[in-house]
Image (tube, rainbow, N blue to C red):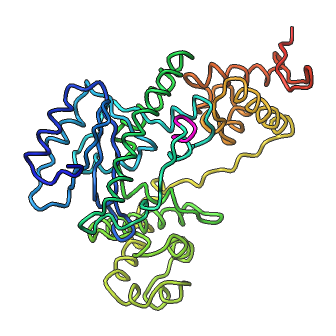
């Protein structure tokens, strides 16, 4: 029985796994037509690869045994690129499963490149090939086909091999703590908390003024709450570029609102249009001291720009030397901040990143380290 559809079977299976060192977990869900992801299937395996799928769409199904298993702090929960899976469980359980081990993060630390996909990772580790033809099927339709279940369960059985392989590499290289630091971020509830009044930060707006951002903040919060209440995608309410246009033009009535490019007539004439105008009024009547401040663009001088260029070279050297994906070590924004400030609050100057990159970055900035050619390879040179 590969799919569990009764409370008794789910409880027995979860009890069986409760003493395991680790379990592998994956989900199938839909999100195209909803704000919140619709959980359609949960796949779990223990180290023995005797995997099962749990059907959460069965009427009156009791998922508490599953939740208790995911909350068990004595069991490591293995995911691959698990952020969306963890978000689903956080929304259902009000707690993030922990401890976890994300094989995509581990793979980046073990030399498998930037954000490697699951299929490619499994092929690299085991030589196995995964049939992904069922990946984008409608997982909410019942009954599920044997092909769908084979694909779904294969994800968690292969994940056992990936975990054991990556765990051994991390142990040998002394990098287990590196991955644990990254996984702690995924286990932090703040990673999944969605304050509507922070939604504006994810919307691009050209040359914004404080007034524009104050309006955008109210509009984005309105859209977020509107979509949450109706459980529909927020882009179905109003698209980002339309919100940005409204914020920039600040219409005072429905006539002016209707002139905004790409806004629908229904949005203008209905209750949503009234709410938009009220949101604009609310923003403009709020104390100016509370308006968001436009983010100042960094203006690097010639010396600082040169530092950025050298740090890019340093990153390539460090990434190759340590066999760690460059993407997880430092970003372009990190380079600019470091060029300006030795004490910049950036990931590249913290934890394991500081050990392999950050300290050298500061040394290069102050002339204690140089980059040059040695035997035809770019390398680092200490300067006495």
Compared across the picture, whether 378 is left or right of 135 comes to: right
Residue at (48% x, 62% y) in the render: 214
Closer to the camera in the image, 292 or 12? 12
In this rendered view, identify the residue nearer to me: 3 or 25. Answer: 3
352 displayed left or right of 381: left
Q: Is residue 165 above or below residue 56?
A: above
Q: Is residue 237 magenta?
A: no
Residue 92, position in %: x, y?
23, 50
Horizontal side of 380 relative to 175 (left or right) equals right
Magenta-highlighted stretch: main secondary structure?
Answer: helix
Determine which quarter of the picture holds residue 109.
top right
Q: Residue at x 90, y 24 (%)?
A: 372
Residue 54 picture location, percent across and down: 22, 50
Q: In the image, what residue occupies the spot 76% across and 46% down?
A: 299
Q: Is residue 124 magenta?
A: yes
x then y, percent, for residue 193: 34, 48
- Point out the image quarter for the C terminus: top right
Q: Which residues are magenta?
A: 122-126
Query: Residue 189's x, y, as percent?
Result: 33, 40
257 lies above or below 169: below
């Amino acid at each position: 029985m590969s799919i569990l559809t009764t409370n008794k079977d789910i409880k027995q299976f979860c009890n069986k796994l409760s003493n395991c060192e680790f379990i592998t977990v994956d989900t199938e869900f839909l999100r195209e037509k909803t704000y919140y992801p619709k959980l359609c299937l949960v796949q779990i395996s223990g180290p023995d690869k005797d995997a099962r799928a749990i059907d959460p769409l069965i009427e009156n199904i009791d998922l508490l045994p599953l939740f208790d298993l995911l909350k068990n702090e004595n069991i490591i929960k293995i995911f691959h690129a698990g952020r969306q899976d963890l978000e689903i469980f956080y929304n259902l359980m009000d707690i993030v499963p922990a401890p976890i081990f994300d094989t995509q993060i581990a793979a980046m630390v073990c030399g498998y490149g930037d954000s490697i996909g699951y299929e490619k990772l499994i092929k690299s580790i085991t030589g196995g090939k995964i049939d992904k033809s069922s990946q984008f099927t409608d997982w909410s339709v019942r009954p599920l086909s044997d092909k769908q279940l084979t694909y779904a369960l294969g994800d968690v059985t292969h994940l056992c091999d990936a975990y054991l392989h990556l765990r051994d590499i991390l142990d040998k290289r002394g990098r287990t703590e590196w991955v644990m630091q990254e996984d702690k971020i995924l286990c932090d509830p703040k990673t999944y908390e969605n304050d509507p009044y922070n939604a504006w930060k994810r919307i691009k707006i050209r040359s914004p003024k404080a007034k524009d951002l104050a309006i955008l903040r109210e509009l984005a919060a309105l859209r977020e709450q509107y979509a949450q209440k109706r459980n529909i995608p927020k882009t179905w309410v109003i698209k980002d570029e339309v919100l940005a246009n409204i914020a920039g033009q600040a219409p005072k009535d429905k006539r002016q609102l209707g002139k905004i490019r790409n806004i629908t007539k229904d949005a203008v004439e209905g209750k949503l249009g009234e709410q938009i105008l009220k949101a604009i009024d609310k923003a403009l009547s709020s104390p100016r001291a509370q308006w968001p401040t436009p983010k100042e663009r960094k203006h690097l001088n010639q010396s600082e720009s040169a530092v950025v260029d050298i740090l890019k070279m340093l990153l390539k050297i460090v990434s190759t030397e340590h066999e760690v994906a460059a993407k997880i070590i430092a970003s372009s924004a990190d380079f600019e901040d470091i060029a300006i400030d030795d004490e910049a609050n950036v990931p590249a100057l913290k934890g394991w990143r500081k050990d392999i990159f950050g300290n050298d970055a500061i040394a290069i900035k102050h002339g204690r380290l140089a980059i040059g050619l040695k035997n035809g390879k770019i390398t680092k040179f200490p300067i006495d």
